[in-house]
Image (tube, rainbow, N blue to C red):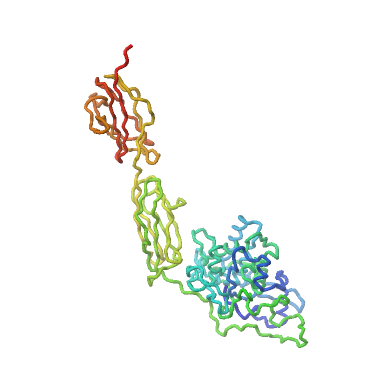
Amino acid sequence: MAAQFGRRLRRGATTTAVAAAAVAALSASQAPAAQSDSAADARAAGETPPGGSAATGNSPYYTDLPPLSTPGGPGTSVVLPAAGSSEAGIPASVLAAYKKAQQEIAGTDAACRLPWQLLAAIGKVESGQARGGKVDADGTTFSPILGPALNGQGFALIKDTDGGAYDGDSTHDRAVGPMQFIPSTWATWGQDGNGDGRKDPNNIHDAALAAGRYLCAGTRDLSLAADLDGAVLSYNHSTEYLRTVRSWFDYYKRGTHEVPDGTGVLPADTSTTSPSPSPSTPGGGTTPSPESTPPRAGGGTTPSPDPTPPPTTKPPTTKPPTAPPTTPPTTPPQSFGRLENAGTGTLTATAGEAFTERVKVRARNTLGAPLAKASVTFTLVGDTDTRFTGGKRTVTLTTGADGTVTAPALTAGEKPGTFKVTAVAGTAGPRPLTFSATVEARVADTIARTGDTALTAAPGGAFAGRVEVRTTYKGTGVADTAVTATMITDAETPAENDKGPYFEGADGEPVRTLDLKAGADGLLKLPEIFADDAEGTYALRLTTASGATLTVELKVEAAPAA
């Protein structure tokens, strides 16, 4: 969506012969000679994806056509320039994005048969191939490509749908990025084409993939002329737009080549003062009627019903301004100022469990106002096996309209201890915001026997079998749990008993309190227990450091007489 100029044909098209060449080129490209410009007709033909309107909001666009040559005299065929001409050059990053989008869609929607040259044609008409390929190494434009406010004054009326997050306008929407999506359409069709975790309409990889999926909506097969025309009309409800895109599509199919980023050929006229097409009259007032042929600089080569012949150099319907600016209007990007905590609570979790709190920050610009679309990178720092959702240590996200962004949920690993989460934004002297986090070791909340065999012994003998227990936390065994085993007087007054069952010390002397530790999976087998000569029922109390307890009954009784 760049400006809609008064110019409707290529530069220098001032003769009837050249106008005839333009008509021939459009015929060769299979562009329809007569189409209705009404949005209703477009929708009836199924050009608009379900639930959406034109991707660009029927915004203005560049109307320059590809260069044509007319060798020989009248009636000879039109020959488009061979690959290698300046107009056939597409900036490297932009060309790569188109081809990558075609490849990805071919893998998920092969029946659509999307040609990358169609994306190139739309990209040329909408933004001059991202202003001649002025993108960074990631494919993001150096400054946002924004169209005029769609305020109904010469343009369609589309009130703000994104709080200004994408277009910087909180009153009306503007088309955004190399493929000129309006924010409401981007919210539905936006894609992450370069795998950086963001959907940025100002990134050519994201925008090209989104445009491809939009064009392939429904059951379209773009190898069919009718489906291709419907797809283009869904992008902008204007037959003039369709003819222009079709012309570039045919031109690129005849040959293109790669040029360095930033060196692409820009449209000659970059005015933004001409009215945009609107849903009621797509393409503006210069759109031909359903019975007309594409506009021609010479006033047309078909005889008019009027016996008076048209002038040979009919001026364009809309005159371009005398001193157009060199680029479409943009809203100056806001500068990043600082990051602040946006309400992050205490970051603590037990090993193996998810943190209940998530890191949340807010970006502000240099004036202190919330900054939307700021890129924030969250990183886990320290000797920790804790990870963000998806197993990542680093994630990059973009702030919303209110300047805030929340990191993915954290899941604690098995290693207890402390670590840090940093949030970094800005490119000039990044200023990190740091949060401390703690992973606590599992602490057993339960201790229980692994069997239920009664424990008995004769006076002066040993108890049959050994007591085995397991310490667990929420059903999971906890290794290395400290356990104290004490022979007690009774459950009500758990003092150490001085008679009854006992363990043997290293010197063979009775020991009635032992400090033990559970092994793998929380299992602990107690030493052998002996009985003295006192008969009766006794209690063994097992206690963990966390307060989990277990009382085991021990009986000392003489064997029955034979």
Farthest residue, direction left: 498
Q: Quadrant of residue 482?
A: top left
Tell me if residue 257 comes above or below residue 319 in the rendering.
above
Give the quadrant of the N terminus: bottom right
Q: Tell me which corner region of the image, top left, top right, bottom left or bottom right, holds residue 422.
A: bottom left
Q: Quadrant of residue 289?
A: bottom right
Give the mark count: 0
Q: Residue 121, how many percent across, how many down? A: 62, 69
Q: Quadrant of the C terminus?
A: top left
Along the line of sight, the residue nearer the viewer: 331 or 90? 331
Q: Is residue 91 above or below residue 489?
A: below
View extreme (front): residue: 492
Residue 114 is left or right of residue 33, and the answer is left
Residue pushed farthest bottom? 308
- Taking the spot 35% from the left edge, 48% from the top edge, the residue there is 439
At horizontal 58% and vertical 73% (from top left) the residue drawn is 59
Kindly identify the residue that appears in the image at 34 percent across and 40 percent down.
445
Q: Position of residue 307 (x, y in %)?
A: 78, 87
Q: Is residue 75 above or below residue 512?
A: below
* Residue situated furthest top in the rendering: 562
